Image (cartoon, rainbow, N blue to C red):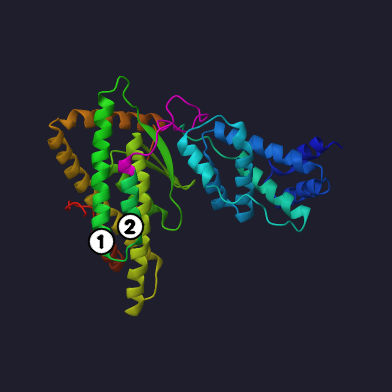
């Protein structure tokens, strides 16, 4: 029997049947034919290319494999993505950044061919069943997964924002983290206004784009609420896909960059504050509880969102006054464009009630932590 036929038989046996015995039978076929390895890798590259056509990105594949399978499968999919990359056309900086942070694709020494073949087949089963995702670029079918940043270096404003948030995450003093986060949000709002004004006067104004941001367990609901609040404060809209573990954020490119940076930073700050609050609870004789953490993060998201919006509105008003322009028509037109793009991507959405928010102490501590990380108006830092 030819090697290609061996792989075909293994796929027919295992990929379209979820039974464990079917997987074992197919793994035995592959294990008995060492020449099948190269053909198996080539088929894996085809699965990855098909995922790109269905709108998936490198980070999306790694995320879903990590959620559904195990570390060996993550290493395998990372290796497949790297192998496929030289055959792809350029897809923009956001895509390239995802390739740069892929997990180590080097597989550990294998003890037996049967186990390895079984793991590969489990991975291919998952890749075969991936649904199509909404294209992130208007008018595309997922073949181009990035836009708006090609050849565009990071602005000085974003570099400053990134540095401020890194300091906010690193400091152990709530007041300092508060001031650093506040300054970062002010810079984000002003940077957004600058980009809006430049686009409004450009020969071909920008169009809104989209990106996906992972919302990882545990406490995904509360984290999705926090991401939604950050998006809303920065002129974006977010739609959470709970089964696949991400939110799609729609907005203009400068605002998308701001949302990615601020959400990641606030999540780090929230989790650090939650750890401290839990330590205080344990010192008072109360054990750690899931409801405490869920309530903490939900309260943090609610309060942080309120303060983010207030800081962004104040900074936007200051920017408009300083520039002696009426920003309302410009920002209103961009909001309409974002809403229209969101509705084209997601014609049907539903709202979800946040579950598990029943711990009063968790809510109080989460609100207090958000106050420490709040983003109000402050004097510029020295």
User: Can you name the residue that lies furthest to the right here?
Assistant: 1
User: Can you see residue 140?
Assistant: yes
The numbered disc on residue 167 is: 2
Q: Residue at x 29, y 58 (%)?
A: 299
Residue 154 covered by magenta stretch: yes
User: Can you see residue 355?
Assistant: no
Q: CA distance from mark 2 to mark 1?
A: 9 Å
Q: Position of residue 209 (x, y in %)?
A: 38, 32
Q: Position of residue 175 (x, y in %)?
A: 23, 63
Q: Position of residue 73 (x, y in %)?
A: 63, 51
SS at badge 1? helix
SS at badge 2? helix
CB of mark 2 within 8 Å of CB of mark 1?
yes
Residue 226 covered by magenta stretch: no
User: Can you name the residue that lies furthest to the front here?
Assistant: 382
Q: Residue at x 25, y 58 (%)?
A: 178
The numbered disc on residue 244 is: none
* Left or right, residue 68 beside residue 165: right
Q: Nearer the viewer, residue 63 or 318?
A: 318
């Amino acid at each position: 029997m030819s090697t290609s036929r061996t792989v075909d038989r293994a796929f027919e046996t295992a990929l379209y049947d979820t039974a464990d015995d079917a997987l074992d039978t197919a793994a035995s076929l592959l294990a008995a034919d060492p020449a099948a390895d190269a053909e198996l890798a080539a088929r894996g590259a085809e699965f990855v290319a098909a995922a790109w056509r269905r709108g998936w990105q490198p980070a999306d594949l790694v995320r879903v494999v990590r959620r559904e399978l195990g570390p060996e499968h993550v290493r395998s999919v990372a290796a497949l993505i790297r192998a496929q990359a030289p055959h792809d056309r350029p897809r923009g900086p956001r895509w390239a950044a995802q390739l740069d942070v892929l997990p180590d694709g080097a597989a550990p020494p294998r003890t037996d061919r049967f186990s390895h073949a079984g793991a590969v087949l489990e991975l291919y089963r998952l890749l075969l069943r991936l649904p199509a995702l909404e294209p992130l670029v208007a008018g595309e079918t997922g073949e181009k997964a990035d836009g708006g940043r090609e050849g565009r270096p990071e602005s000085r404003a974003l570099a400053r924002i990134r540095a401020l948030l890194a300091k906010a995450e690193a400091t152990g003093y709530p007041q300092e983290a508060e001031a650093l986060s506040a300054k970062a949000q002010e810079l984000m709002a002003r940077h957004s206004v600058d980009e809006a004004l430049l686009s409004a006067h450009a020969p071909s104004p920008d169009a809104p784009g989209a990106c996906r941001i992972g919302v990882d367990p545990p406490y995904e609901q509360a984290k999705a609420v926090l991401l939604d609040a950050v998006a809303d404060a920065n002129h974006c809209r977010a739609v959470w896909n709970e089964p696949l573990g991400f939110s799609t954020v729609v907005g203009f490119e400068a605002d998308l960059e701001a949302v990615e940076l601020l959400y990641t930073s606030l999540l780090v700050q929230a989790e650090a504050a939650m750890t401290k609050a839990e330590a205080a609870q344990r010192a008072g004789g109360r054990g750690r509880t899931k409801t405490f953490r869920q309530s903490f993060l939900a309260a943090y998201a609610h309060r942080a969102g309120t303060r983010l919006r207030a800081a962004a509105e104040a900074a936007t008003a200051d920017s408009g006054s300083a520039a002696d322009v009426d920003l309302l028509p410009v920002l209103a037109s961009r909001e309409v464009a974002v809403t229209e793009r969101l509705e084209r991507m997601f014609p049907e959405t539903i709202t979800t009630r946040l579950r598990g928010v029943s711990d009063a102490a968790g809510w109080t501590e989460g609100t207090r932590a958000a106050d420490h990380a709040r983003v109000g108006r402050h004097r510029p830092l020295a």
